[in-house]
Amino acid sequence: MFYTEYYHQSIQKTSKKAAGAAALHWERQKISDRRYSGCNRIDVHEGEVPSFGYVSSDGMEQVGVYVVLRGRNFPDGIYAYDADGRSGAPNVAGQLVKIGGKDEMKRLAEAFPHKDFLLDTPILYLFTGILERSVCRFKEGAYSRILQDVGACVGSVMLHAKAKGAKVFPLGGFVDDQVAVSLKLPSTEVPLAGLAVFPEYSELAYDSIDDGVGESAYSNRSEADPLLMAAEPGASFDAGCVSASSRYPSRFMRQNRGECIEDLSKCIRVRRLATQALPGDEFPLTPARYDSKLYGQVVNDLGKVPQRRIPFKRTSFDLDEFSSMLRWLEQGKINLFGAGLLKIWIVVFDVMFVFPGVYRYVPVRKSIYMQGGVVAAKKFVKCHVVPEEVENAAFAVVLTADLKEACNLLGERAYRYLNLNAGYIAQSLHLSGRVLNKTVRGEHFFYEDDLKKLCNLPDGESVISEILVGK
């Protein structure tokens, strides 16, 4: 059994277990200083960063953003993005703080499998998870929440860049520790994803490492630590247990170490796309309300709004709006990092001209396939810790994966890719909902076993994320 499966089991909630105090194992240390005193700062103006922000778990803002610039209007170097930085000039949307020069840029490029590609990339975004901000809120589940936040942030930057005509490439394979050292990260901040952006035409970009699809992933299966993978969750916290990961007392830090790539020469690139039709009645989607160009323009005009957890209004969902939200998932890269391993289930309650039931969405075929009958709305809300917040949802998007299958392909790193992919889908649905004046939010607190049983999801599937859509 892979450690990923143990970790996912440890963060599941169950309605049948008596509530008790959650035990959290965490290293005590001083929170790092992020003011970057003495570093050169450059203003970032509105329009240069996504104005709509990204979906964040309870507004924790737990994603660190770093930018490597080459041949742009700014001096070449590695920059940390400080969203709260202000110089007093008008229309400033943050500041870039220079933390590294050309030597650090070269060392950073060596952490990636395609060094030459990185050395010619004009803009490279690196996204990190800041664990110290969410661990008190989500306990051991903090890591999966952070991964989904990072996926949402990557999606935000990707959609913003694509709307401006840029070519973008998700980068999920790199030597984790080397990136962390190059960025001078504290131990509570971990590198999780990268995104290469080519704003102008580039022969390198159009003859790219993955044909521009961005759906390949790097498997670290061959270099996995057998001591970590074989460990029972209880054994990992035994003071007498000596292993390479014994300094990480929390489960999520052990999961992070299991995902890390240390030697790219031992990794293989995996690309797996599922495009076949599914059994069950097929329901073709209607055309999207806006084409790609117009959708990008509308999204870039959106501002950032606070997330509110209020009950949905009781109203029917329009078929064209339902179809548009699903079709617009492909405005970015729907299999972002995930290599096609994430499955999209749609639980329909109240959508015009669509029978209530459980469907699978196959993006390539632009259709949903009925997999189960009507799901009782009253039973569905009881599968959640706070039922009132779920009532009157028009439909729910449930993202699942077979963790054993995914880990057999990608090693423990599969869990990272799956959650990053889920974060992008949540961000895309959130933006589409705002375009259509709908309410979309991720629901983190649900009883997984009850939800799977009610929706008749396969036993081998694990629920990675759930997104609710309504008015």
Image: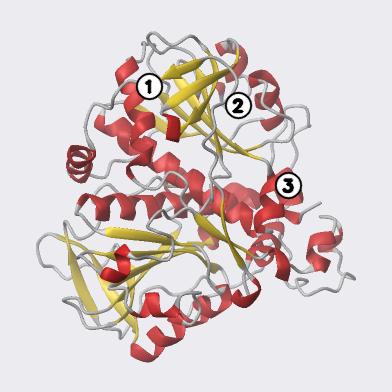
Q: Note whether 150 is above or below 202 in the view shown.
A: above
Residue picked out by circle 3? 404
Query: Is 28 left, or right, of 429 in this rendering?
Result: right
What residue do we see at 55% from left, 39% from top?
274
Q: Kindly identify the amino acid type of the residue bearing the numbered disc 3.
A: Lys
Q: Which mark is residue 384?
A: 2
Give the residue furthest to the left. 90
Q: Note whether 130 is above or below 461 in the view shown.
A: below
Query: Is 93 left, or right, of 185 in this rendering?
Result: left
What residue do we see at 60% from left, 26% from top?
384
Would you say residue 82 is visible in this rendering? no
Residue picked out by circle 1? 285
Give residue 203's position: percent from left, percent from top. 27, 69
| Mark 2 or mark 1: whose residue is earlier in sequence | 1
Q: Kindly identify the amino acid type of the residue bearing the numbered disc 1.
A: Leu
Give residue 326's position: percent from left, percent from top. 39, 30
**Alpha carbon separation for disc pair 3 and 2:** 26 Å
Give the residue furthest to the right. 240
State the residue in front, 244 or 305.
244
What residue do we see at 68% from left, 41% from top?
402
**Alpha carbon separation for disc pair 1 and 3:** 32 Å
Secondary structure, mark 3, is helix
Give residue 463's position: percent from left, percent from top. 63, 36
| Mark 1 or mark 3: whose residue is earlier in sequence | 1
Give residue 61's position: percent from left, percent from top. 41, 54
